[in-house]
Amino acid sequence: MAREGNSQADRALGALRTLILSGAFERGEKLSEIALSDRLGISRTPLREAMMHLHQEGLLSREDSGSARVSSYTMRDISDAIEVRGTLEGLAARLAAERGVAAEDHAVALGILDALDLAMDAASGVDFRAYVKNNTSFHDWIAQAAGSPIVTREIARANRLPLAGPSAFLTGQEGQSPFLRSLIIAQDQHRTILDAIMTGEGGRAEALAREHARLARRNLQQVIDRKNTDISAIPGLSLISPN
Amino acid sequence: MAREGNSQADRALGALRTLILSGAFERGEKLSEIALSDRLGISRTPLREAMMHLHQEGLLSREDSGSARVSSYTMRDISDAIEVRGTLEGLAARLAAERGVAAEDHAVALGILDALDLAMDAASGVDFRAYVKNNTSFHDWIAQAAGSPIVTREIARANRLPLAGPSAFLTGQEGQSPFLRSLIIAQDQHRTILDAIMTGEGGRAEALAREHARLARRNLQQVIDRKNTDISAIPGLSLISPN
DNA sequence: CGCGCTTAGATTGTATACAATTCGGGAGGT
DNA sequence: ACCTCCCGAATTGTATACAATCTAAGCGCG
């Protein structure tokens, strides 16, 4: 049998997801199971399992007849998805503030924020790889800070939506100066959110977490407005319909 | 092939979900695919598909080895799930207020609320069947009121969590007088939420929708505290661990 | 010339056989 | 008595064959 991550189904899931996000298919393109099966060298049974998974992730949508199509999203869909994420992170932050956070967990969060500072102040400009990694970690920390598996799970779900994750627009932006400014603002928001959580200011923590997500929305808008963006530089961007 | 709802996979999904929610299995019981396959008269392929679906619904959890267990939830998990639902419905209500609602959609909502009044004022006590149906309709209306497929979808997801749906605690409660009072309060909240949405009071609409969900939380607590509750009267209650 | 029907090819849904792995129990040794 | 190792039964993962259905092209008819 297969260990975690070693199964054919997991391989199919990863491979197909990468293909879709990298723009290997057109928006709305119909995917044939047999064709994909041949292309990936994986039989239809685990492939169908992977496609079901991608369906619930939102990357595929099912026709009435049962055939699968690559999903198509509008700008507003992504914007709404980010708002949903912000709302749920706000909930997590508020609950964490209300329920309290152990000193041990607090230390972990501080460590992540210090690492983010370090990534920004690197001698050779910003260390994007480290920033993305630690930014993701901090958002994961918030998701778990309330100590509620349900909240954590729902946030994870919201993050799976194509471009809604906290680090979706942190790749392929290295040289942009307005983007650098937004990193500074984002990091300040990180510290402020953690402060509000630790002082038990639930309402403040929630409002800040929401606004923090809206910063991602602004970045999305900037990326789109800048016309010469390489569509393949940001995974999933090919799923967005132009208008 | 199979039309929507006619496939073996859909039948397996419905049958297995009903079995689980009705308490046919113990909490944490390991489910063998072969045994279930025999019991339901459905081969393993569509059965596995159904089990994957139930896994993402939260009714099943997977062991490292791949075997499936019936999920177990705590009281607090359910409480959190209801809070998540309230938060997302609050988001939907706020967005609806901010973005505006067409007169046509407003009329639909008013129709649903009138039907709810009618169900409560029925000559022979409360018509629970009608109340549940229209209560569900109103919550669906809110989920769609923002005009955002993403928001609608996330709310639908949150509702799938075992006892988190808006009508989860409306069955098996017919004779309870404190419960009747909560129906009156709930219906008042319905009207107030709609009013806030239509007058563009986004913050108010959001706060009310959240508090409305917390009423469901109070009902849950009442059901649990009342010791003589028939555990099979409320679908999914068997998944809750006592402590 | 356009439209509906028929039919063949392609595609999805399902069952089943087989391979790989896990799990539990029993034998044997210390 | 307890621990370890090993083996067989049970269980899950995968491939594949077949059945049911969809799709699209070609044909006949108005």
Image: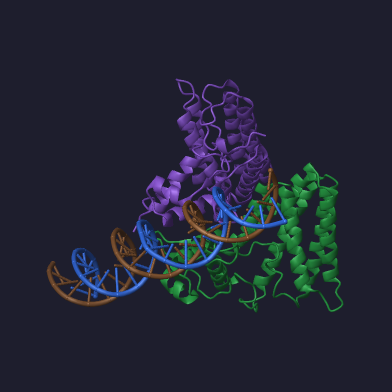
Chain colours: A purple, B green, C brown, D blue
Question: Is residue D19 found left or right of A158 in the rendered image?
Answer: left
Image: B206 above or below B229: above
Question: Is residue A83 found left or right of C8 in the rendered image?
Answer: right
Question: Is residue A172 found left or right of B165 in the rendered image?
Answer: left
Where residue A178 sits: x, y (%)?
60, 23
Image: A161 above or below B59: above
Which residue is depicted at the point 49% across and 45% down?
Answer: A104
Which residue is depicted at the point 72% across and 50% down?
Answer: B90
- From this viewpoint, is residue A34 visible? yes
- From this viewpoint, is residue B242 visible? no
Where residue A38 sits: x, y (%)?
40, 48
Labels in figure, total: 0
Image: B80 above or below B179: above
- Residue D7 occupies quadrant: bottom left
Foreground of the two, A31 or D8: A31
Foreground of the two, A65 or A83: A65
Foreground of the two, A199 or B33: B33
Question: Is residue A203 found left or right of B122 in the rendered image?
Answer: left
Image: B187 above or below B196: below
